[in-house]
Amino acid sequence: EKNVNISRGDVYKYITPDYYGLRDEEDGVLLEVEEKASKKRREQLNNVRDEFRSIVNAKISELESDDDDEEQQAMGGIIGAEDAISAHVALPTQEIVERTILEEKKKKLLDSLS
């Protein structure tokens, strides 16, 4: 049972930059592993990007080939990529808004009568 008084300064005195990982790149092993992982990730990203572009181009060409007004209205009138990006938010119709407001007013009235 030794009673050793070690101060905080004594503990920090023996902590080297290796403890914080500052010299991990000096041996080159970590750099090789990171390079392989980043190449693999870049390939995956390029594959996903190419797949997404092909899907978007197919949808755009499909929408451009359809001249039917009913079909364009069902799709929200989207006819190009710029419209597709700006039309991703679904807006409620006037009828839905009126019905929701009416339901809220009914609920408040019923609550006040209770």
Image (cartoon, grey):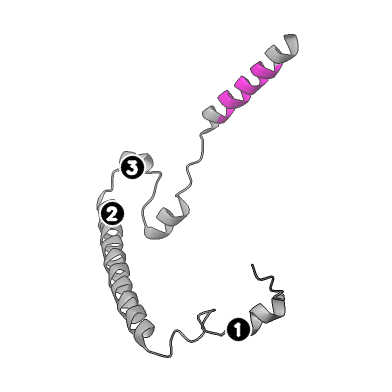
Q: Nearer the viewer, residue 10 or 86?
A: 10
Between disc 1 and disc 3, the foreground one is: 1
The local secondary structure at tag 1 comes to: loop
Q: Which residues are magenta?
A: 97-108
Residue under label 3: 69
Label 2 with label 1: CB-CB less than 8 Å: no
Tell me the number on the disc at residue 14.
1
Residue under label 2: 59
Q: Position of residue 111 (x, y in %)?
A: 70, 14
Between disc 3 and disc 2, the foreground one is: 2
Give the amino acid at mark 3: Asp
Q: Is residue 12 above or below residue 81?
A: below
Quadrant (top left, top right, bottom left, bottom right) of the C terminus: top right
Give the amino acid at mark 1: Tyr
Q: Quadrant of residue 43?
A: bottom left
Q: Is residue 74 above or below residue 104?
A: below
Name, please, the residue furthest toward the right.
112
Q: How far apart in space, not on screen, are marks 1 and 3 (Cα)? A: 76 Å
Between disc 2 and disc 1, the foreground one is: 1
Quadrant (top left, top right, bottom left, bottom right) of the N terminus: bottom right
